[in-house]
Amino acid sequence: MLILGIDPGTATTGYGLIEKTGQKITPVEYSCWRTPAGLPMPQRLLMLSEFLEEVLGKYSPSHLVVEELFFNRNVTTVISVGQARGVILLAAAKYKIPAYEYTPLQVKQAVAGYGKATKQQVQYMVKAILGLKECPKPDDTADALAIGICHAFTIR
C-alpha cells in the first residue's frame, strides 16, 4: 500500500510517499514543494495543484493523508493553509484516492508515543522508523512523513 502524507502550506508543502508492506514501512519519495513569495495566491495554489498531480499521476497512491487544520494565533496563516488543504483534498477526490486527516496531536502520539512531543523528537522517530541516515529536511517534509507513518500505524 502506498501512502502519501502531506503537510499543507502555500509557501512550503511537505510531502512524503511511503510504502507499507505488512508491518514494514519504507520511504519511496519525500521532499517539499515551494512557491514564490511574491506570486498571487491563485497562482500559488495552481502550482501546488500541479506539483501534487504530478506525484499522484506518477505513483497512484492508495491513500492520501493530510494534517487536519488547527487554529493558531495567525489567522492569515490558517486561511492560506486552509486553501492549500482544499487544493489537496480536491486532488484526492479528482484522482479517486481516499483522503484521511489527523490532528498534530494524533500524529505525535502515533509516531513518538507522546502527544506533546517536540518537532525534534518526531523527526528523530521518523528517521528511526524509516531507517534514514539523517532527519528529513525541511520540517515540512519530516511532518509529511510523520503524517503518513501515523496513518500506516492507524489503518488495519
Image (tube, rainbow, N blue to C red):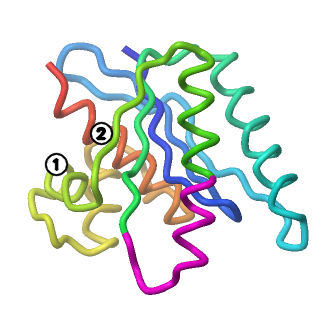
Left/right placement of residue 90 relative to residue 155 reads: right
Q: Say which residue label 1 marks.
A: 110
Element assignment for label 1? helix
Number of numbered discs overlaid on the protein picture? 2
Looking at the rendering, in which quadrant would you find the C terminus? top left
Q: Say which residue label 2 marks.
A: 149
Looking at the rendering, in which quadrant would you find the N terminus? top left
Going by the numbered disc 1, the residue's amino acid type is Ala
Q: Is residue 82 above or below residue 6?
A: below
Left/right placement of residue 81 relative to residue 153 reads: right
Element assignment for label 2? helix
Badge 2 vs badge 1, beta-carbon distance below 8 Å: yes
Going by the numbered disc 2, the residue's amino acid type is Ile
Which residue is nearer to you in this view: 4 or 41? 41
Residue at coordinates 62% horizontally, 19% vertically from top-left?
94
Residue at coordinates 39% horizontally, 22% vertically from top-left?
19
Q: Earlier in the sequence, mark 2 or mark 1?
A: 1
Give the distance between the C-alpha atoms of the residues marked 2 and 1, in whole angstroms. 8 Å
Quadrant of residue 130 within the rendered picture? top left
The segment highlighted magenta reads 71-83
Pointer 2 local density, CA inside 10 Å: few below 14, some 14–19, many at least 20: many
Residue at coordinates 40% horizontally, 36% vertically from top-left?
65
Pointer 1 local density, CA inside 10 Å: few below 14, some 14–19, many at least 20: many
Residue at coordinates 52% horizontally, 60% vertically from top-left?
140
Q: Is residue 66 above or below residue 151?
A: below
Q: Is residue 31 above or below residue 21?
A: below
Image coordinates of residue 84 in percent, x first then y, are 62, 52
Image coordinates of residue 57 in percent, x first then y, are 69, 16
